[in-house]
Amino acid sequence: MSLDSIPRHGNTRYPWASWADGQPHWAKAHRDFTCSLEAFRRALFTYAKRHGLEVTTRSDRATNRVWFQFQQPNKP
């Protein structure tokens, strides 16, 4: 998904609702996000914390991609 197709107002920079669907996703630098890989991963963790979710991430510097998956937390 290109950043150009996402409405830009307030904090609606990324398609968080579609990304937080529990499925694995990946995003590519300079196509899906404009910050560094590390900054994008921090944004993913911040979103997860604010919405009561957990997120798993993997970065691939060679391809400038971040793989991620949001999940509901496991409650004992």
Image (tube, rainbow, N blue to C red):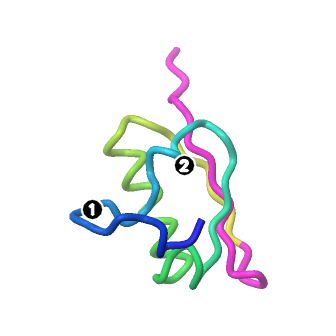
* In the image, residue 35 above or below residue 17: below
State the image quarter where residue 30 is shown: bottom right
The residue located at (46%, 56%) in the rendering is 15
- CA gap between label 1 and label 2 equals 15 Å
State the image quarter where residue 66 is shown: bottom right
Q: Residue 6 placed where, x, y %?
A: 43, 65
Q: Earlier in the sequence, mark 1 or mark 2?
A: 1
Type of amino acid under label 1: Asn
Asked if residue 51 lies left or right of residue 5, the reply is left
The residue located at (64%, 75%) in the rendering is 28
**The N terminus lies in quadrant:** bottom right
**1 or 61, nearer to the observer:** 1
Asked if residue 6 lies left or right of residue 37, the reply is left
The residue where tag 2 is placed is 19
State the image quarter where residue 61 is shown: bottom right
Q: Magenta residues, as a range? A: 60-76
Identify the element where label 1 is drawn: loop
Q: Which mark is residue 11?
A: 1
Q: Residues within 10 Å of mark 2 (few under 14, many from 20)?
A: some
Instruction: Answer whether residue 40 is magenta in the image.
Output: no
Q: Residues within 10 Å of mark 1 (few under 14, many from 20)?
A: few
Q: Residue 55 placed where, x, y %?
A: 55, 46
Type of amino acid under label 2: Trp
Identify the element where label 2 is drawn: helix
Asked if residue 25 lies left or right of residue 19, the reply is right
The residue located at (32%, 60%) in the rendering is 12
* In the image, residue 69 above or below residue 52: below
The residue located at (44%, 51%) in the rendering is 16
Q: Residue 51 placed where, x, y %?
A: 35, 39
